[in-house]
Amino acid sequence: MAKKAPRRTAERILEAALDLFNRFGEPNVSTTLVASELNISAGNLYYHYPAKDELVNRLYEAYELELDALLQASDEVHDVEDAWFFLHSLFEVIWRYRFLYRDLNDLLSKNRRLEKRLQLCLANKVGAMRALLAGLRRSGHLAIELGELDTLAHSMVVVLTYWLSYEYVRNPREALEPGHAQGALLRGAHHTLHLLAPYLGAEPRRHLMTIGNAYAVQDEVVAA
């Protein structure tokens, strides 16, 4: 039993750090605050994570594992309904680690390891969007030239990457609070998926509009 205690403490530290980073922003959270939140000594925290960058890197690794597992499912998207579910699931992962997106520029400026990993992450996202678009094209739902597919994939990744920043600018005091999660996720998935609209056939486009309208109502209820 004694051997498991350090592992449990390390996990608790990560959970507390993730919560605080998400709530207040990584630059505004010190290791002392994380230790205080858990009612442990700073020395206990440093035993597991000698620097705050270690916390950030471990949280990023957890995010990367979740993200990569989901991105692998992109080639299983065959219609608009699949695409909606996939994108919403993707935004859920992004939301769980939203400090990475909220504080992106600051993190990149001071964490060289994270800089390299995030560049790879972007490439993986683009690859997943290409696979999603190719699947819709093969299924006859998307009328797009191969030369345009890559540009559209990059555009979708831009929205995915900066959507929470947009939400934050719109409402800095509340946008990234848990009570606003559902609305932010719905809007992000809707706007990312809507980039496909000009390339969809008549029936898939109507289906896209139906999905968008249904979730727009839910978004209004959440926002209220």
Image (tube, helix red, strand yellow):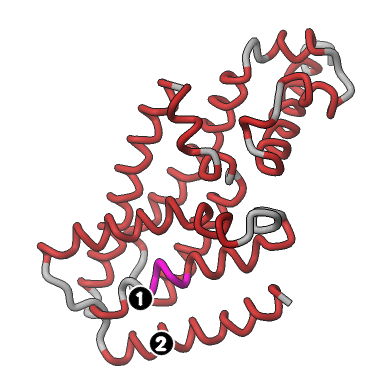
Q: Position of residue 172 (x, y in %)?
A: 64, 54
Packing grade of label 2 (10 A; few <14, some 14-19, many >=20) is some
Magenta-colored segment: predominant secondary structure: helix
Residue 192 forms part of the magenta stretch = yes
Residue at 43% across, 43% down: 68
- The N terminus - image quarter: top right
Q: Which residue is mark 1?
A: 79
Q: Which mark is residue 207?
A: 2
- The C terminus - image quarter: bottom right
Identified by mark 1, the residue type is Asp
Residue 107 forms part of the magenta stretch = no
Residue at 51% across, 44% down: 101
Helix, strand or loop status at disc 1: loop
Q: Position of residue 136 (x, y in %)?
A: 27, 71
Helix, strand or loop status at disc 2: helix
Q: Nearer the viewer, residue 158 or 129?
A: 158
Packing grade of label 1 (10 A; few <14, some 14-19, many >=20) is many
Q: Position of residue 62 (x, y in %)?
A: 56, 34
Q: Earlier in the sequence, mark 2 or mark 1?
A: 1
Q: Which mark is residue 173?
A: none
Residue at 33% across, 35% down: 120
Q: Is residue 93 above or below residue 139?
A: above
Q: Is residue 169 above or below residue 37?
A: below
To which quarter of the image does residue 75 belong? bottom left
Side of 148 where 195 appears, left or right? right
Identified by mark 2, the residue type is His
* Circles 2 and 1 in contact, beta carbons < 8 Å: yes
* Region in magenta: 190-194
Measured in 3D between alpha carbons, the distance from the residue under mark 2 to the one under mark 1, in whole angstroms, is: 10 Å
